[in-house]
């Protein structure tokens, strides 16, 4: 595959852009692989890429029931940050953030990672105490973080309402300057292309219908395109993790919910950073196309329908208008719902399972996008070595019986 | 938006209700007899069904009663609503 560069842009421009090659090989499944990743989202593709790059595995495949870039990876609010409270979580997300910083160069695909900073607002005295605690915890873990006051916020973001008369007055915020946003579908395409370059087979429109075992060892998967033999299966299927787990006869501590996000009509540049608020519950940034990209919380009920309720949309819009009264006349262009798998402690599961050769990467809930590179990195390590990387060892399925939960609910500015 | 028919109050908007998740999870009779794995299974592991699912809702801004809803988690169609019965 040809390398993308200024030269390749020029060369293809001269031939009217008619000669660009497909970014990855379209292949039919082979009969046997050394490892199969189920789920062709960002995390699955990143896993395949690092399996090939870091662990030298070449005879591997990613099977995807839809198409690459058709799921949550390309339907999220693209926020990348690592300012979590607990050491286990912040180190995992920080590993990811470090990988983001060199990702476009590494995979020769512009993921448009823009470190424009993320503000997590505090609206009450307790919010500010929690923010100071989290910022201190971040600093102890070597992660950039600072506390800013309302005047500094107003100076950086002139459109925001920091008046004391606001229903939820803004008292301050945590600010992570290295945080930001990335182009979400480019992440899926970039990893797919880079993995394909290493010889990874990317098999689209191939739905897994069963997991075959011999005793407690995986021996292959049944798919809509036939049986494929393998002794290692990495399941990275987000909202459908429980469905796949049921095929293997195990139970997961997950609930799948719709998570909605919204994009406005394009506006002139008005917001050059990311603002999140737990108290009014909304988050917002502006894309390079000028659209306001907005998100909030999950719909409360369990659902696989890729749609949510209108009251959730109203709630989110109220939050955004509370922060930015001047946006009240902005019209929304698109809305979508993705299925996210919520775990009891708001932390992911990156783990071996009671079945040998079956690994799960799930439970990212509402905030998986930011973790894409790091998740792939540690999950590839887990699959290749049949034991977790030290960064994901705390995120095992066992923690729900040992009690070593990593409680990031609310504590880590978790409106993702 | 879900329209839910409370067994006591009739059809009301989703915003009047709180969600209670999977229904018919029975608290173990003798928790001390369980090992950590069995306790975790009761406490955390969920069916998370894709398809017909039995769940509990509370009419929290109405009569505040709990009741059961059988709902398709893909189409969101509510197929049955009933009062809570004892779990066998």
Image (spheres, coloured by chain):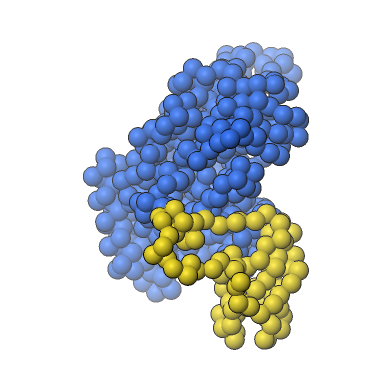
Q: Residue at x 64, y 43 (%)?
A: A247
Q: Position of residue A274 (x, y in %)?
A: 45, 50
Q: Position of residue A294 (x, y in %)?
A: 55, 54
Q: Residue at x 63, y 78 (%)?
A: B85
> Would residue B70 be visible to someone looking at this image?
yes
Q: Residue at x 56, y 57 (%)?
A: B46
Name the quadrant containing residue B20: bottom right
Q: Position of residue A133 (x, y in %)?
A: 26, 56
Q: Position of residue A223 (x, y in %)?
A: 72, 34
> Would residue A377 be visible to someone looking at this image?
no
Q: Which chain's colour is yellow?
A: B
Residue nearest the viewer, comparing A415 with A356: A356
- Up-down relation of residue B39 to residue A19 (above or below): below
Q: Position of B34 compared to A64: left or right?
A: left
Q: How many marks?
A: 0
Q: Residue at x 57, y 73 (%)?
A: B18
Chain A rendered in what hue? blue
């Amino acid at each position: 595959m040809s390398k993308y560069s200024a030269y390749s842009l020029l060369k293809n421009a001269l031939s009217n852009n008619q000669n660009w090659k497909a970014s990855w090989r379209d292949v039919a499944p082979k009969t046997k692989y050394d490892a199969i990743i189920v789920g062709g989202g960002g995390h699955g593709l990143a896993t395949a890429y690092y399996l090939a790059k870091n662990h030298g595995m070449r005879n591997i495949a990613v099977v995807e029931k839809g198409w690459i870039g058709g799921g949550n990876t390309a339907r999220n609010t693209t926020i990348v940050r690592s300012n979590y409270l607990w050491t286990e979580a912040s180190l995992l997300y920080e590993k990811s953030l470090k990988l983001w910083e060199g990702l476009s160069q590494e995979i020769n695909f512009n993921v448009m990672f823009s470190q424009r900073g993320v503000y997590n607002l505090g609206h009450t005295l307790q919010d500010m105490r929690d923010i100071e605690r989290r910022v201190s915890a971040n600093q102890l873990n070597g992660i950039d973080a600072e506390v800013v006051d309302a005047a500094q916020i107003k100076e950086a973001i002139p459109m925001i309402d920091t008046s004391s008369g606001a229903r939820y007055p803004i008292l301050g915020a945590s600010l992570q300057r290295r945080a930001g946003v990335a182009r979400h579908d480019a992440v899926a395409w970039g990893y797919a292309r880079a993995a394909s370059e290493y010889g990874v087979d990317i098999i689209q429109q191939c739905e897994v219908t069963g997991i075959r075992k011999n005793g407690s060892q995986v021996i292959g998967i049944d798919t809509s395109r036939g049986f494929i033999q393998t002794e290692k299966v990495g399941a990275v299927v987000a909202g459908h993790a429980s469905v796949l787990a049921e095929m293997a006869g195990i139970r997961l501590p997950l609930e799948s919910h719709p998570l909605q996000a919204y994009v406005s009509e394009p506006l002139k540049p008005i917001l050059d950073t990311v603002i999140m608020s737990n108290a009014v519950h909304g988050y917002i940034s502006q894309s390079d196309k000028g659209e306001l990209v907005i998100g909030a919380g999950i719909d409360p009920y369990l659902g696989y329908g890729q749609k949510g309720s209108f009251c959730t949309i109203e709630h989110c819009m109220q939050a955004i208008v509370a922060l930015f009264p001047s946006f009240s006349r902005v019209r929304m262009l698109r809305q979508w719902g993705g299925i996210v798998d919520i775990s009891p402690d708001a932390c992911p599961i990156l783990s071996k399972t009671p079945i040998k050769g079956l690994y799960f990467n799930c439970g990212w809930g509402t905030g998986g996008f930011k973790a894409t590179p790091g998740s792939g990195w540690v999950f590839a390590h887990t699959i290749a070595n049949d034991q977790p990387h030290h960064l994901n060892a705390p995120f095992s399925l066992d923690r729900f019986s040992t009690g070593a939960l990593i409680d990031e609910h609310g504590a880590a500015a978790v409106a993702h | 938006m879900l329209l839910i028919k409370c067994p006591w109050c009739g059809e009301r908007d989703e915003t009047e209700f709180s969600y209670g998740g999977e229904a018919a999870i029975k608290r173990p009779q003798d928790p001390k007899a369980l090992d950590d794995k069995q306790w975790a299974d009761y406490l955390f592991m969920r069916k998370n069904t894709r398809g017909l699912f039995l769940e509990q809702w509370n009419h929290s801004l109405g009569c505040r009663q709990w009741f059961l809803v059988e709902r398709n988690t893909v189409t969101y169609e509510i197929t049955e609503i009933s009062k809570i019965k004892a779990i066998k």
